[in-house]
Image: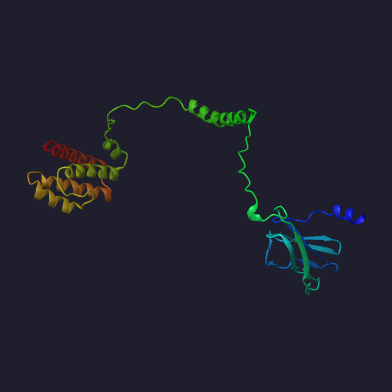
Amino acid sequence: MMLLLLLGLQAPPPTVGDTIWLERSVDVPAGAEVRAAFWEPENEIGLLGRAVVRREGNRVTVAYPAVAWSAGTHTVLVPGPVVIRRDGVTDSMPSEPRTIIVASLLPAGQPPDQLPVQPEAGMVDQRVHTVWPVVVALLLAGMLFAPVAWWWRRRGKPAVLTRGEPEVQPIPLTEWAEAGESRAVAAVAARGLRAAIGAQVRGMPPGVVTARLIRVVAEQRPAWPVEDITRVLEALEAAQYAPAPPREVTRLVERAGDLQRRLEGAA
C-alpha cells in the first residue's frame, strides 16, 4: 500500500519535446570560479540553450536545458563543471551518466500508423467590445495634426503670381562709376556688348578672347563698325584691370551702349 502511494506521489515523466534540466552540483573552495563545460549531446538528446550556473555558498550547480526527441530510456554523459581556483589552477570535473525516462505523447498499446488523424483546429473568434483603441488613435491623430494646422493658418495668404516675365530694371552704371566702381561698370558694359554680338554671330562662345571675337565679326559681319567695336572692347578690358577716371569709363559705357543698340537694330 505504501509503495502504491509513493508511486502515485511521483511526478509524471517528461514527454517528447519537454524541457529537461540536467544538473551537476559540486562543492568548491572559497574564492573559486565555476564555469559550465561545453557539451554537445548525442543520439536523441539535444540542448535548448546555454547552461545556467547557480551558487549557494560553496555549492555550485550547473544545469543544462535539454530535450528528448524520442520516447524511451536515454543515458547521457553530463560533463563536469570547470573549477578555476583563486591561484589560477583549473580543474575539470569528470562526466557523470544520467538516465532519462521519456514518455510518449501517443496512446500506449496502439501503433502510430493506426491512430486517427486529428481534425484541423478552427479559427479563434475574438471580438473587441471596447472603443478605447479608436479613441486613443483619434487623440494621437489630433495631437499630430494640431501643430501642422496651426502653422498652416499663421503662414498667411499665398502670394499671387502675375503672368508674364518681370520687367528687368537697367543697371545704373553712371551711378556706379561715380561711386568708384569703375571696374565693375566696365565689366558690365563689356558683357552687354559681347552678348549683343554673340546673339547675331554663329559659333561664338561666351568667354572667347577679344582678338578672336573681332576676327569672327570681321569675317561674318563686315558691314559692322568693326574698328569701333575693337576700340571699345579693348578700352573696357583695360579699365577692368587698371584704374581709370570715372568720366572716361562713363564715355566708354555710353559708346558701348550706342554700339549695342546699333547691333540690335541691325538684327
Query: Which corner quadrant holds the N terminus?
Result: bottom right
Front residue of this view, candidates 44 and 176: 44
135 versus 16 height, above or below: above
**Furthest residue in direction left, as rendered:** 223
At 56% from the left and 32% from the top, the residue drawn is: 144
How far across and down, in percent of the image, does residue 243 sit?
28, 48
Residue 23 visible in the displayed image: yes
Q: In the picture provided, is 216 more to the left or to the right than 149?
A: left
Q: In the picture provided, is 246 more to the left or to the right than 8?
A: left
Front residue of this view, candidates 147 and 99: 99
How far across and down, in percent of the image, does residue 189 sit?
23, 42
97 versus 182 height, above or below: below
At 23% from the left and 40% from the top, the residue drawn is: 250
* Quadrant in the picture for residue 252: top left
Front residue of this view, candidates 1 and 94: 1
Query: Which corner quadrant holds the C terminus?
Result: top left
Front residue of this view, candidates 159 and 191: 159
Q: In the picture provided, is 8 more to the left or to the right than 249?
A: right
Residue 245 visible in the displayed image: no
How far across and down, in percent of the image, does residue 199 sit?
17, 42
At 75% from the left and 56% from the top, the residue drawn is: 14
How far across and down, in percent of the image, does residue 227 sit?
11, 47
